[in-house]
Image (cartoon, grey):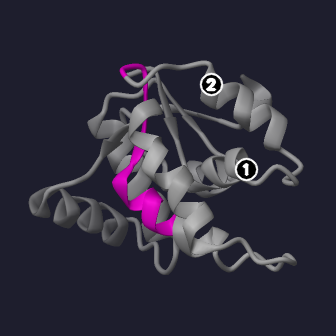
Amino acid sequence: MRAFFDTSVLASVFYGDHPGHEMSLEAFLAYGRKQAGCAAHSTVELYATMTRLPVRPRIGSDQVMLFIDGLPRRLTLVSLDSIEYLAMLSEISAKQLAGGIVYDALIAACARKAKASVLYTWNPRDFERLNVENGPDIRTPADR
């Protein structure tokens, strides 16, 4: 797999008023389903993020689900099994990382499982902080 997308990029693909929308959309459309993926968990994060954006009018759950339902046509959704979840948590614990970074670690573990070459994110420092061995290059859509 060539590319993997984290939730921040998927949200900016969906939300046209996001400052990175055009660059994110360009990166998203540059790959086909066999070349690109995202963590299955990102669909949950995307739903939570988009339905609670501080915008008026609010983005309805039905609109968000239209986008999420279409993701498998463009991306391979990757998930971890229970043993892989525990291994990822052990890595985080060994690095003494705590809190929300665990969600980035989950995405990074899915990208590594998919053998992605690059992980696109608007939060590169969060992923660089994980210092994932044998993981994908971390880039923003602007760095394509």
Residue 124 in view (yes/no): no
Q: Residue 58: within the magenta?
A: no
Q: Which residue is mark 2?
A: 29
**The C terminus sits in image quarter:** top right
Q: Residue 36: within the magenta?
A: yes
Q: Left or right of 79: which side holds 26?
A: right
Q: Residue at x 22, y 54 (%)?
A: 80
Q: Which residue is mark 1?
A: 12
Q: How many numbered markers are drawn?
A: 2
Q: What percent of the width, then of the height, locates residue 95?
A: 40, 65
Looking at the picture, tell me which residue is in the foreground, 136 or 10: 10
Say whether marks 1 and 2 touch (CB < 8 Å).
no
Q: Which residues are magenta?
A: 34-45
Residue 82, image quadrant: bottom left
Q: CA distance from mark 1 to mark 2?
A: 13 Å
- Amino acid, disc 1: Ser
Residue located farthest toward the left when viewing the structure as drawn: 83
Q: Circle 2 — which element?
A: helix
Q: Residue at x 46, y 72 (%)?
A: 97
The mark that comes first in sequence, 1 or 2, is 1
- Amino acid, disc 2: Leu
Q: Residues within 10 Å of mark 2 (few under 14, many from 20)?
A: few
Q: What percent of the width, then of the height, locates residue 7?
A: 57, 55
Looking at the picture, tell me which residue is in the foreground, 70 or 76: 70
Q: What percent of the width, then of the height, locates residue 121?
A: 64, 45
